[in-house]
Amino acid sequence: MIKAAITAVGGYVPDFVMTNDELAKLVDTNDEWITSRTGIKERRILKEPGKATSDMMVFAVEELLRKRGITALDIDLLIVGTITGDLIFPSTANIICDKIGAKNAWGYDLAAACSGFIFALATGSQFIETGKYKKVVVIGVDKMSAILDYEDRTTCVIFGDGGGAVLLEPSEDGNGIQDFILKSDGCGRKYLYQTAGGSLMPPTHETVEKRLHFVHQEGQAVFKNAVVNMAEVSADIMTKNHLTADDIAWLAPHQANKRICEATANRMGLSPDKMMMNIERYGNTTAGTIPLLLWDYEKQLKKGDNIILSAFGGGFTWGSIWVKWAYDGSKVGK
Ligand code: UT7
């Protein structure tokens, strides 16, 4: 049976580093609070005027193509998990395809907030498994700074900009995406949202004045739901597939909060050294966190490693994917 294997990874974070101390000059916060509550020390911000989400992913996709030794013309389909597309429409996938010259590809965006990458990965894998396509690029990325209120200390300290891309190709050696459990519950929409700018409340002077175009989060409610559901779905995918903690090489948890990641690893019975973490450097990049983890840890990943990808986010949306890694990352040049 054909499986969809991840055969290359690319990533991008902007150069500008915003530290906790820098944020403490903008809002009433401090390094101690941010570090102890979230694990974040700094995040990257895309500052250059005129640069958007698509520009970050041009770098990531070009890296992935270089590593795999193929060109943009080889791509059949490109899916972008994001909630901060360049424009309301057309899709950021279209824009990326145009900028990289992927003239044989079609594409679309998928909005599932922090679960955007895993939802897109599961979707993309189906086009490979059916035999329809040979090369699908799946992206998770967000430019959160575009929708953050730098006067709201409860949100602006958490999020950052960045993301990554993976290439999916058919594999017949058993490696690749093995299973996924994905969930959504629209009742969660009252705890994490952006009020204005959509068809419910189109932009007006008033929506801008009332700061309704920014992210609003009820942190504690989201935390409680995230900690339970991300841990539960990660344990469920193990039980469903008869996997024990010894079988798992890595957990790649959405980097929402260090405490949520630790609770998930704990529920799965995993030791902390099996948990990928980079929240301290990038913060929460929403759909970008999981591909950025794969990008950062690529060198340590071995062919056949069982990896569990898990996320929880706005919607609510959440889920886990079991991947058998398809290549030795140590052999890949940057
Ligand atoms: O990725 C998408 C899904 N999102 C998540 O998973 C995020 C889940 N939520 C969280 O990670 C946490 O709820 C936060 C990190 C957002 C907040 O941590 P918390 O431990 O839940 O803090 P809290 O909201 O209960 O606030 C505790 C106190 C409050 O002060 P009082 O009322 O106790 O006086 C806040 O006003 O901390 C205050 N506070 C801050 N203080 C300093 C809130 N934000 C800040 C801040 N700096 N940045």
Image: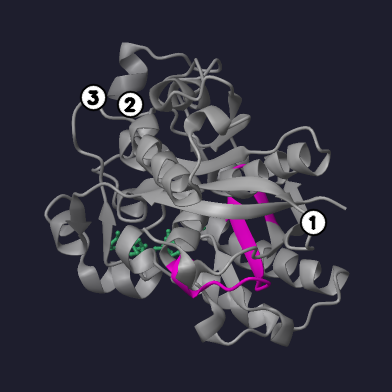
Image quadrant where residue 150 sits: top left
Query: Is residue 91 placed above or below 224 in the rendered structure?
Result: above
- The amino acid pointed to by label 3 is Gly
Q: Amino acid at mark 1?
A: Glu
| Kind of element beneath mark 1 | loop
Estimate the x, y position of residue 313 in percent, counting from the top left: 57, 50
Residue topped by disc 2: 210
Name the front one of labels 2 and 3: 3
The amino acid pointed to by label 2 is: Lys
Q: Position of residue 101 (x, y in %)?
A: 44, 23
In the image, which is nearer the foreground, mark 2 or mark 1?
A: 1
Work out whether mark 2 precedes mark 1 in sequence or the reverse, and give the earlier one: 1
At label 1, counting other C-alpha atoms closer than 10 Å, the crowd grade (few under 14, some 14-19, many 20 or more) is: few
Query: Magenta residues, as a range?
Result: 297-319
Which residue lies under the disc numbered 1? 172
- Residue 34 in picture, x, y percent from top left: 30, 67
Distance, label 2 to label 3, CA atoms, is 25 Å
Q: Nearer the viewer, residue 229 or 178?
A: 178
Mark 1 vs mark 3, CA separation in Å: 43 Å
The reply to whether dot 2 and dot 1 touch (C-beta < 8 Å) is: no
- Cβ of mark 2 under 8 A from ligand 1: no
The label on residue 94 is none
Q: Earlier in the sequence, mark 2 or mark 3?
A: 3
Total marks in image: 3
Dividing the picture into quadrants, the one containing residue 96 is top left
Query: Is the residue marked by circle 3 packed among few (<14), some (14-19), or many (20+) residues within 10 Å?
Result: few
Tell me, yes or no, if residue 193 can be seen here: yes
What's the CA distance linking mark 2 and mark 1?
A: 55 Å
Q: Which residue position is annotated with label 3?
A: 50
User: How is the model colour-coded?
Assistant: one colour
Callout 2 crowding tier (Cα within 10 Å): few <14, some 14–19, many ≥20: few
- Check disc 2 and report its element: helix, strand or loop: loop
